[in-house]
Image: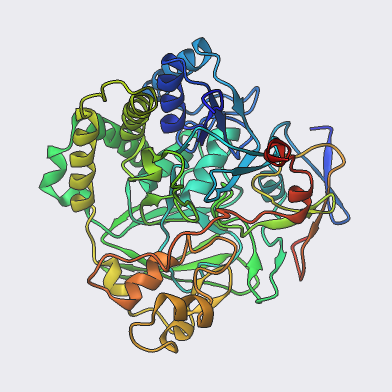
Amino acid sequence: MNHHIHWQARAIPFQTGESVASALQRAGIHQLGRAPTGQALAVFCGIGQCQGCLIMADGQVTEACLQICRDGLTLQPLDGDADV
Amino acid sequence: MSDHPILIVGAGLAGLAAAVELARQGLPVLVIDQAQAIGGAVHRQPLPGVRSTATGAQAHRWSRLIAEVQAQAIPIRCGTRFGGVDHTGAALLTGALSTLIRPRAIVLATGARESVQPRPGWTLPGVMTAGAIQSRIKTLAEPPQGRVLLAGSGPLLLAVGAELCRLRHPPIAIIEAARPLFNPASLTLPLPYLTEAATYLAHLLRARVPLFFGAHLTEIIQTNGPLVAQIDTRKGPRNFAVDVIGLHDGIRPNDAGLTNCDVIPTLRLGDCREALGARAALADGFAGGQKLAAELLGTTPPSPNHDLQRQRAAQARLARIYAHDGLARLAEIPAETVICRCENRTLADLRALGPAPTARALRLDGRFAMGACQGRFCAEWVGRLSDLKAPPKPIGAARWPSRPISVADLLTTSDPIEKETK
């Protein structure tokens, strides 16, 4: 685990091939932001169906559960308060 | 047009089995999957260097299918998402393979989605589907961090619980609404079902996991600490403080936003058409592939598949064994309970639409099934709450795109069809 993704200002290690969702969960990050409706964004279905875990990955909106980690990947919440 | 491939959406059991049958008949196929690896939900593959958590029977079934996929040199593009097919037969793919294609036929094998009944607090971070926990276990052989509670109804709860035990991280408890072990009809299930269940129970009992049958998770609350699950057991209320809750109330076809196309054959196979589980999905994939090949080549259609009938009967029996009164509780949930997760719409919002709202009112006024998941997780309950006795109706007709597509993805999509017609 020498490589890292960056969740806001925090560097998080990952296992080769794992999803952003699973690396963030291991780091204790569950709330990934808050939708404009007030709904917390978090992993729910884990397989790309519910759209509940949307984040910004290198500037693009994507599902944290489908996005695969790569070294230096920069991640931000879409909006609202998130776990750090 | 005969050189155009048959597009197969989903590289799980049904999709790959269909691909094998079509390729055997000399028909070109292209298999896509939105995940980064083949396998689907049931045969989700471990990452390199991670040991597989598959049972011997599962591993055997998968390696046999993969041997045939390799023998036929079937082209598979992972990380590729199916946006939909329009009335002209043009299909939009985005992601790793980003293009418009005009397939000769389409096989939709997008598998199942989990059904999760709304409960107060089910939208809190840390509350996920039992399947989400299971896919993490399958890819990483690693349990979620912290205390895990599994609740809802269905055989998957026992399966995920057993997998957690094998990883030496047993769940705090399993809350199952039905009482399958107390139903004598359980013994009439096919032998493979019984041995599977016995294996799970053995793991759970050895790890002394408390199993509550006929019990319901009624509410999840969180105040700056762990998630607290309120449970209605047959012997009175209990609560459990945990970090992760896996909910599951059965599986349904994952068919939201999937439309048929009038100008090319469109076939739905496996759980995507009828959620009958892995054994049926494999049989249906092979049978469906044969049927489509016969249709395209003008040969004699194959005889009906008895395997599928047997699995359908077994699943119907399983559903009866797992019957419970959870639906009656649906009507009693507090009015402020969120029903539509995407648009944060509550039971009170649904009631405000009046009795028997039309699909149009549900969508345009209520915003139900209008969010990014397209009703995958709310439509069933909106339907049920409108009429508790009838099976839920879809809210309006299915429409593509079958998933949100970003403008960035559209801009990078190549359009060979446009070039053809110019």
Q: Quadrant of the C terminus of chain B?
A: top right
Give the color scheme: rainbow, by chain, secondary structure or one colour.
rainbow
In percent of the image, x 45 and y 31: which residue is there? B15
Residue furthest front as drawn:
B422
Of B405 and B308, nearer the camera is B405
Q: Closest to the observer: A23 or B16?
A: B16
Measured from the top left, where is residue B150 in percent x and y? Answer: 43, 54
Q: Looking at the rendering, in which quadrant would you find the N terminus of chain B?
A: top right
> Residue B63: x, y in percent?
46, 17
Residue B64 appears in the rendering:
yes
Numbered marks: total: 0
What x and y, as percent, mark residue A68?
72, 39
Residue at the spot x=57%, y=49% of the render? A46
Q: Quadrant of residue A23?
A: top right
Where does the image place residue B397, in percent across and percent down from the top left? 43, 63
Decide: is A28 above or below B95: below
The residue nearer to you, when weighing B297 against B147, is B297
Please report the residue visible at 39 percent of the width from the left and 49 percent of the height from the top.
B253
Dividing the picture into quarters, in which one does residue B99 lie?
top right
Image vertical order of residue B258 relative to residue B28, above or below: below
Depth order, front residue of B389/A10: B389
Q: Is residue A18 left or right of residue A11?
A: left
Left or right of B104 on screen, residue B154: left
Q: Image height check: is B149 above or below A12? A: below
- Does residue B41 appear left or right of residue A64 in this picture? left
- Looking at this rendering, what residue extends furthest in the top direction? B71
Q: Is residue B59 visible from the viewing direction of this image?
A: no
